[in-house]
Structure formats: structure tokens, C-alpha cells
Image (cartoon, rainbow, N blue to C red):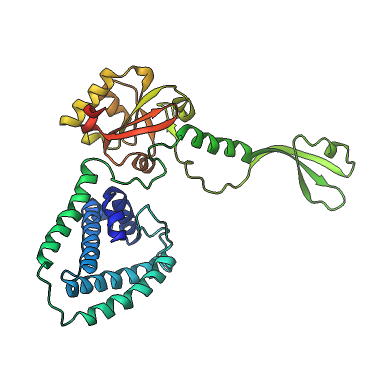
Amino acid sequence: MFSGFVKSVDPVGTSIFVEKYLATYSLESLTPMALTVAVALGAVELMLGIMLVSGAYRREAAVGATIFLSIFTIVTLLSATVLPIGDCGCFGDAVKLTPWETFVKNLVLLPMAIVLWWMCCKERPNRYSLDVLVVAALFAVGVNLTALRFLPLVDFLPYKEGVNLREEVAKVRDAESDAVRSVLCFVDKSSGERVEYPADDADCWTNDNLEYVDAYTVRDEMSEMTFDDFRVYDTEGLDVTMSLLAREGSVVWLCVGDVDAMYGSRLRAAQEVVRNTPSSQLVVITSDDSAKLSTLLGAPCYAIDAMTLRSLLRAPVGIVVITDGIIDHKRDIRDYTAF
């Protein structure tokens, strides 16, 4: 139930994991079906969980659970060995598990599913089984469709409402600045080894055993940081992220992940946003064709990485309002009138 629910509340996020698996298995031709597969996967898992707990068609649910666990036990074993994939996406973005952790989990659950299947072989459906099945199906599909029409019911991503994006990105930039050091390179005359000293170290100049060679900057290795990928570029390719986040008051970020989706109600709503929002309080960002989008909206557009934009907003076209650097709220562009 939990696995199906976290997939269903964010089918777009689940489709990203599906795309990753398809790419790993060299099945990129099936990528257009990723969202459909994600919806079906989350809905079926959620239905199976509800049926197992309620006892509705428990034998059939046990068979389904056994089949699911058998398939994914093999898949996660491959992902942990010959086809490494990183986070397996078993619990979406809610809980991060490595393929090995997921494989062990499946090894524990698979025998349980088989035993339950064996125990339920002669069990007949209870009188309310069909009712529960219908309700479970409507609920599972409804959760997915609601998330697709609006936004995920629960946001498990870093860019959730209430996050101070300005501060978080500034921390990343500060860490990057600290990771860059100016050094002086000398040769130790006695050993012939090259040694480095900080550029502000005056003692190295008084050491007669050192011979100066060169001066340069080095970048220390940094551990991966959550908001490291949040970078916005202008038309000249300059990083303008911090200047955009520094704007005071409520700033409307019009986010367009797919310019081809800009037609009909989406296009009219986006044009209305541009008309009704002062230019100082409007930022248009896209991971698609910025020139084409700028022509459609008659406003300058900034560029951002596609995966970062999908993490910021799970909609092809939508609004993110950032107030004094804090993510205030998000909406699909079709719900613009709700602001």
C-alpha cells in the first residue's frame, strides 16, 4: 500500500524512474509510454495492498503480489550487479533505497507472499469483495489522475512549499567558493618533490630549501549537495540564479517544461500571467526552446536544466511563487485564476 501510494501521489516522478530503467535496459523507444506505465504500476500496487489488507479477493491479490515481487526481485538484483541504476525508485522520492536494500526487502517479502498465496488457495471471496475492489480501483486511479491534473498530493521533493530556496542555494554557492583555493607550488630541493602551500602562507618564501615553480587554483572535491543543480542562465549563458532569487516580495516564476504544451487554455493563462505581472516580479524559465517561448509570451526567458525543473514543478506549464526567497505556493497554469 505504501509503495503504491507514494508512486500514485507523484506519477510524473515515478515516470522518471521508469525512464531511467528503460534507458538502463536500452529500451528508449518505449520512453513515450513511461507515464502510462508509472500510473498503471502505482495504481495496481495500491489496489493489491488494499485488497490484501481488506481480504477482498485475497487469493488473487496474493498471486499478484507474488508475481510483482518475483519480477522486481530479479530486476533489483540486476540493478545491484550488472546493470547499476542507483536509487531504484521502489518508494518514489519518499524513501531512498539502494538496489541492494530493495533486493533484501524483496527477499523477505517474497516468501511471505508465497505462503499467503498457499494459505488462500481454497479461500472464497467474501460478500464485500467486489465492492472493495471497485472502491480500491477508483481510489488508486483517482489519486493518480488528481496528481496529473493538479500537482502531487504530497510533495517529497526538496523544492516543497516553505523551503527557503534563496538560503539553500546560497549555501551551495558558499561551499563552492570555499572549495576553490589559490596555492603556490614549490619543489623541495632535497627530495625533488613538488609541494603546495596556501597562497597566503608567507613562510614558504623564507624556506631556502624550496624553489618556486608556479601559482594556480585548485578545486577540492565536494560531496553532492541537494540544491547544487538549481542554476538559471540568461540568453548569454551567464548564471543569474542568485540575482533572480534576490528579488524582494512575491515573484512569479512561470515554469515551462514543454513549449509544445503551450496551446489552448495553457497558452492563454500564461499570456495572462505575463500581462498582469510587473516585469520586476516575473521570471520565465524553461528547459525547452527559450527563443520559441519568448516569442509566444513576448517576454525574456531564462534556461534551466530539465530534471531540475521537473523537481521544482511537476507540471509541463505552471507557476511557482517565491516570496522573499521562500517557495510560497505552486500551481498548474490552468489553475492560475486560483491565485
The x and y percentages for residue 301 are: 34, 26
Q: Is residue 328 above or below residue 118?
A: above
**Which image quadrant: the N terminus?**
bottom left
| Front position in the image: 122 or 40 | 122
Horizontal placement of 229 versus 171: left or right?
left
The x and y percentages for residue 200 are: 76, 34
Q: Is residue 81 above or below residue 310?
A: below
In the image as oriented, which residue stretches furthest toward the right?
208
The x and y percentages for residue 2 are: 31, 59
**Which image quadrant: the C terminus?**
top left
Horizontal placement of 162 versus 339: left or right?
right
Figure disc tally: 0
The x and y percentages for residue 36 are: 20, 53
| Front position in the image: 118 or 11 | 118
Q: Residue at x 22, y 50 (%)?
A: 143
Q: Is residue 161 above or below residue 140?
A: above
In the image as oriented, which residue stretches furthest toward the front?
127
Q: Quadrant of residue 64?
A: bottom left
Q: Is residue 107 above or below residue 244?
A: below
Q: Residue at x 83, y 39 (%)?
A: 204
